[in-house]
Amino acid sequence: MTDLASIEPMLKVETLGLRFRNPLILAAGILGLTAPILKRVIESGAGGVVTKSIGLKPRKGHPNPTVVDLGFGLLNSMGLPNPGLEEFMKELETLRGLEAPIILSIYAFSEDELVEIGRIVSDFNVVSAVELNVSCPHVDGISEIAKNPVLVESYVQTLKRHLDKPVIVKLSPNVSDIVRIAEAAVDGGADALTAINTVRAMSIDIEVGRPVLAGIFGGLSGPAIRPIAVRCVYEITESLNVPVFGCGGIETAHDVIEFLMAGATAVQLGSVIARGGLRVFKRILKGLRDFLEERGYSSIDEVRGLAHRR
Ligand code: DHB
């Protein structure tokens, strides 16, 4: 078994006033709905976790089928199912005192909802930061936000006014200029960004001549979207001085290094866990250590942003 303690000095990430023991963070929407599973994710080696996206009120989500494995990635349209904020906070309460930061992913259909969420979460110190999901690509009322810089700035500003914690804004790749949206988030007061959420996509069952997903459209994740995510991280960090969490199709230590070199502060893992289980954390951490040692780097800080050199 990999001795995580001996690796961690090379891999630690300090950002947003938080200490992540390594750069591998559980992405929103994967396993993040119950406290025992989040605890297992942290015990498996995650440097931090992002929960499933939670709204003010409970939501059932879309009817099945909601997920299809395309081989090169997952296409999903869960429809933001969740128990609602109050209920979910009771669940998270049992995680008090864990050594990895817990980031609460939230979504809201209006700025009034954001005000209420901000007030409720401010007093809840189990949560270290909030990731604002403005970019779910297939839920009406959410997917429009991430495309509109005026709305993004206003949403972030409203949340920041009512929430006493770092705010990370998760951006959509389904826009023509992601840097413009990233700037709007930063102008609104975002402390960090996550790039990227899933790519709006669809798949058709040719036997029946109908869309595979009951919701017709879904979000594509997994290795197919990785080069899009790397490009987005690079473009944003080329223009803006803001911490960016890279997210999209990361499967190996090689992929993590690629995102760090593109300028990511840390990365988030999603589909790879759905496919490979929780053992991926230790496999990737060991790969990161081997990469750094073989090339004589003393920490991941030395590779961050390297691809921006001229
Ligand atoms: C869901 C939300 C997302 O932000 C996403 O990228 C994919 C799916 C959802 O719950 O439907």
Image: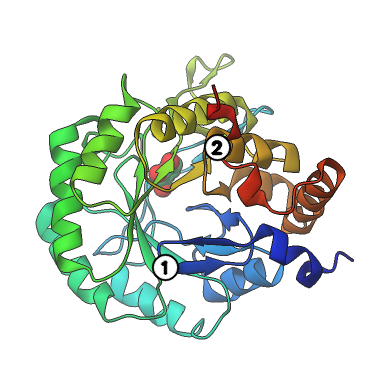
Q: What residue is shown at x 39% (from left), y 82% (from top)?
A: 90
Q: Residues within 10 Å of mark 1 (few under 14, many from 20)?
A: few
Left or right of 40 in this view: 192: left
Estimate the x, y position of residue 33 in percent, counting from the top left: 49, 65
Which quarter of the frame holds ligand 1?
A: top left
Q: Residue furthest right?
A: 1
Q: What SS does tag 2 mark?
A: loop
Quarter of the view holding residue 55: bottom left
Q: CA distance from mark 2 to mark 1?
A: 20 Å
Estimate the x, y position of residue 286 in percent, counting from the top left: 81, 54
Say what amino acid the circle numbered 2 marks. Answer: Gly
Q: Which mark is residue 17?
A: 1
Out of 294 and 275, give the one closest to the viewer: 294
Q: What residue is shown at x 37% (from left), y 42% (from top)?
A: 241
Q: Is residue 248 visible?
A: yes
Q: Is residue 146 visible?
A: no
Estimate the x, y position of residue 245 in percent, counting from the top left: 48, 47
Q: What SS does tag 1 mark?
A: loop
Q: What residue is shown at x 52% (from left), y 85% (from top)?
A: 97
Can you say whether 304 is above or below 160 in the image?
above
